[in-house]
Amino acid sequence: MAEIKIQTQSENNIHIISLQGQLDESTVNEFSTQVYAVIEQCTENSRVILDLEQLTYLNSKSIGFIADFFNRLQSKNSKLVLAKAQANVVDILNVVGIDQIVPMTQTLNEAKTI
C-alpha cells in the first residue's frame, strides 16, 4: 500500500499543497478530499499550487481529479498550477495532455506569479 503525505499552506489567496509519496488507488481519495476542501475556501482570483517535487507516482484517477480541480477553480475565476514535478511525473502529465490545460512551473515563485 502506497503512502501520501499532504501539507497545506495558505497565505492571502495562494494555497500551496505539497505532496510526498505516491498517488494511487489507496491514496487518491485522501488527496482529493483535502484539495476539494481548499478549493471550497477559495475566493475569486485565488491560486492553488500543487507542489509535486516529492511526488513519485500518480495514477489516471488522480489525473482526472487534477482536471476537475482545474475546472472548479476556473469557475471561481481562480487558477490551478502544478509546480516542481519530477521528470517521470511530467512525462505522465504530458502523455495525457494535462500540460496543455494546467500551467506547470519549475519553481514555486514562478507558480505564484502565473
Image (tube, rainbow, N blue to C red):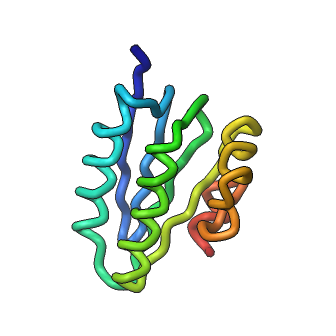
Horizontal arrangement in the rendering, residue 80 relative to residue 9 (left or right): right
Numbered marks: total: 0
Residue 2, how many percent across, how many down?
Answer: 43, 19
What residue sits 35% from the left and 58% below the top?
Answer: 10
Q: Nearer the viewer, residue 59 or 57?
A: 59
Q: Is residue 50 left or right of residue 36?
A: right
Position of 74 compared to 94: left or right?
left
State whether residue 68 is above or below residue 43.
Answer: above
The outermost residue toward the top is 1
Front-lying residue, 18 or 63: 63
Image: 32 above or below 98: above
Q: Is residue 97 left or right of residue 49?
A: right
Work out which quarter of the rendered image holds the N terminus and state it: top left
Image position, residue 69 (x, y; %):
40, 63
Instruction: Classify 65 as above or below 5.
Output: below
Judge by depth and name the residue closer to the eye, 65 or 109: 65
Q: Where on the picture, by quarter, is residue 36?
A: bottom left
Q: Is residue 108 above or below residue 29?
A: below
Residue for point 58% across, 31% down = 57
Tell me where residue 45 appears, x and y as whole percent: 41, 83
Task: Examine the image and state in which quarter residue 92 appears.
Answer: top right
Viewer-closest of 58 and 51: 58
| The C terminus lies in quadrant | bottom right
Seen at 30% across and 65% down, the residue is: 39
Q: Residue at x 42, y 73 (%)?
A: 71
* Residue 54, x across and y down, in percent: 58, 32
